[in-house]
Image (tube, grey):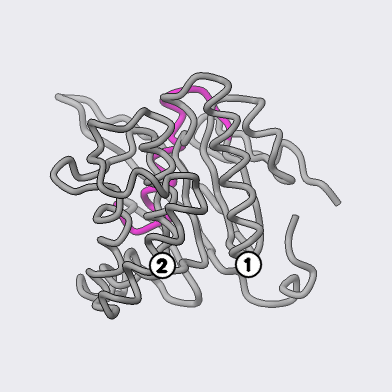
Amino acid sequence: MSNPDTASSPPLLDARGLHRTYVLGHRSVEVLCGVDLQVNLGDFIALRGASGAGKSTLLHLLGGLDVPNAGEVWLQGRNLAHLSEVELAEVRNRRVGYIFQAYHLLPELDALENVCLPGRMSRRPIVEVEREGRALLDRVGLSQRLEHRPYELSGGEQQRVAIARALINHPPLILADEPTGNLDSHTGGEILDLLCDLRNERQATLVIATHDARVAARAPRILEMADGQLVDGRVEP
């Protein structure tokens, strides 16, 4: 559900005519073909579709991790295609929080160091970043695991670290790619509850990609991915 106070404001995220094609051997595979998507501040949107439908590709384009073959992505009024590499890195670091299915934690760093890494990369004061990192890990139930490295944590614990890391710089946009996909149903439910609670607490915008109808059902707006395009599946008033 969109925040009524932002209904008349420019969208937080505006994707226009996105195409993405990959070359595999001697053939081209068009994963996205003309995707349009507007996301307002405070939205919670689920992208639902089968594995391989292009959900991850779309999230990568929306967050500036990849570039489209055609089309534009505007984030907070800035065309990502017009940004320098330094500016784009700043957007990815400060404006977007990523949560991946495979966690992507650095194995040589402990939980606190993984969470604090984006804050340190943005050159925030170290004391401030570590204080907030500890608070976030406490909020996700890992206050006793600060010095544990990823291999010492369960899958659910690693995903909690990844969620805390995504939030450390207070990004207005959170992109979550199958955040419960590697977890059992009980742990996945706990992670989804936590993610929804933190989204509300932080007043953040959440776009979550999933093939699981139960996960998608938590979002007020569901978009179905089919044939490289998005179709509204359900929108709550």
**Reading the chain from its start, which is encountered first: label 1 or label 2?**
1
Q: Quadrant of residue 14?
A: bottom right
Q: Quadrant of residue 219?
A: top right
Magenta stretch: includes residue 150:
no
Secondary structure at numbered mark 2: helix
Question: Which quadrant, please, contains the N terminus?
Answer: bottom right
Front disc: 1 or 2: 2
In this orientation, does residue 136 appear? yes
Which residue is more in the foreground, 233 or 215? 215
Q: Residue furthest right?
A: 237
Q: Residue visible at 21% across and 74% down? A: 86
- The stretch of residues the image draws in magenta is 48-66
In this view of the protein, which residue sits in the foreground, 189 or 139?
139
Is 201 placed left or right of 87 in the picture? right
Residue at x 41% of width, y 46% of height: 99
Disc number at residue 41? 1
Give the crowd class for mark 2: few <14, some 14-19, many >=20 residues within 10 Å: many
Q: Amino acid at mark 2?
A: Glu
Helix, strand or loop status at disc 1? loop
- Residue 19 seen in the figure: no
Q: Is residue 8 above or below residue 16?
A: below
Can you give x and y, in whole percent of width and height, for residue 121 in the image? 22, 69
Residue 140 screen position, x and y as percent: 49, 47
- Which residue lies most toward the top here? 184
For disc 2, the marked residue is 132
Q: Position of 75 compared to 29: left or right?
A: right
